[in-house]
Image (cartoon, helix red, strand yellow):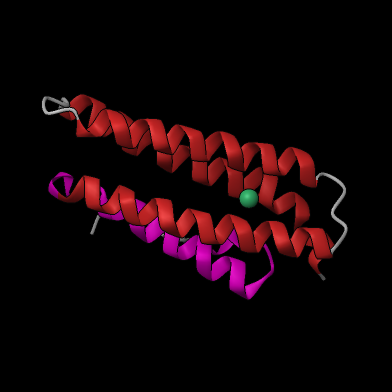
Amino acid sequence: MGDFIWRPEYSVGDEHLDEQHRGLIELIDMLEDQSHMDEVLGRLEIYIDEHFRDEEGMLANADYPDLAAHKRQHKAFEEWLAVSRRAFREPEVSSMLRESIRAYLKSWLVNHIMVSDKDYASWLD
Ligand SMILES: [Fe+2]
């Protein structure tokens, strides 16, 4: 276990989405152990797919006005993740690249939750 943990201030006010965000943070935290990185990134890809689908579905139901922009952020992230996974399979991936992938994942998730996801919180009441 690393030091990346879910915090109450990450809450978007919806139990299901908070639970999924917690799961994402746990997965990213598991990347601390670099020996399982490919497997964890694979699980992350599946988890992200389900989470983005749920989140976008809820926002569509709530008539959230910035849904199109929000979806674009999700899409860009999915593309980044796919490219990173591919880069990862190269035999001589340096530990620096591994560390930068992990650092990017942490900061993307926290920024996305704290800014873009928080923005929809009031629409889900
Ligand atoms: Fe989101």
Q: Residue at x 84, y 61 (%)?
A: 123
Q: Where is residue 90 drawn, in percent x and y?
A: 18, 28
Count numbered badges in the picture: 0
Placement of 120 over or under 82, stated as above or below: below
| Magenta region | 7-35
Q: Residue at x 42, y 38 (%)?
A: 81
Res 12 quadrant in image = bottom right
Which quadrant is home to the C terminus? bottom right
Placement of 119 over or under 58, stated as above or below: above
- 39 within the magenta span: no
Q: Residue at x 62, y 48 (%)?
A: 114
Residue 32 seen in the current view: no
Q: Which residue is situated farthest in the bottom direction here?
A: 15
Res 57 quadrant in image = bottom right
Residue 97 seen in the current view: yes
In-front residue for pair 34/77: 77
- Side (left or right) of 33 relative to 67: left
- 17 within the magenta span: yes
Placement of 103 over or under 58, stated as above or below: above
Placement of 64 over or under 125, stated as above or below: above
Magenta span: helix, strand or loop, mainly?
helix
